[in-house]
Image: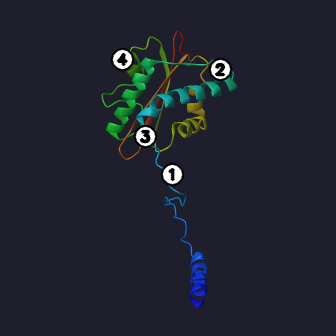
Amino acid sequence: MRLLVSILVSVLLLSGCTTAPPQSQLGADGKPLPKLYRISNAASGKIQFRILDSVNALRQAAGASDVEMSAELNAAAATHSLDMAAQNRPWHFGSDGSSPIDRVKRAGYGGTALGELISETYETELETLGAWMDQADTRAILLDKRATHLGFAWHQETSGKIWWTLTMGSLGAETE
């Protein structure tokens, strides 16, 4: 009996011992580091249409017409995302000196390039879209009433860093 009581007391005492939950790593700003967002091959097609649906919802709320996905603008965006990663800097000029207008023409888009949005981040596509909507200049490109098409692509490095590019274009739009 004494042995049984001793075992029960030991079990009760040990049950009170718990390990602390794992601490999340903190960044220099004291906030938890973001969870690494890995884009799988299966998710890649879904991402483009999630952006298209989200942009169109934002455009509808602003009184603008929906845009359609453009294979040519997707190609221009993909080329630029890969090139930004190779240059290791987010900017609108290609390593060959090309501008967004040059890339859109090279990709065979028959319309006018209205704007290009870029980002270097570890965030998801929707977090990136939110950041673009927070800035007046990038929001104006997304909500441009002349836009008829959208291209969206990215390049993800092995480190997890993602280089996002979104290009808006218009067939038949005159530049203002």
* Quadrant where the image shows the C terminus: top right
Q: Which callout, 2 or 1, points at the residue further toward the start of the chain?
A: 1
Q: Nearer the viewer, residue 22 or 11?
A: 11
Residue 86, x across and y down, in percent: 32, 37
Q: Secondary structure at mark 2?
A: loop
In percent of the image, x 60 and y 76: which residue is there?
16
Q: Secondary structure at mark 4?
A: helix
Q: Amino acid at mark 4?
A: Arg
Q: Kindly identify which residue carries mark 3.
A: 162
Circle 2 packing at 10 Å, graded few (<14), some (14-19), many (20+), is some
Looking at the image, residue 2 lies above or below residue 64: below
Q: Nearer the viewer, residue 119 or 66?
A: 66
Q: Kindly identify which residue carries mark 1.
A: 34
Q: Amino acid at mark 1?
A: Pro
Looking at the image, residue 108 lies above or below residue 21: above
Looking at the image, residue 2 lies above or below residue 159: below
Q: Kindly identify which residue carries mark 4.
A: 106
The span from disc 3 to disc 4 (Cα, nearest Å) is 24 Å
Q: Kindly identify which residue carries mark 2.
A: 64
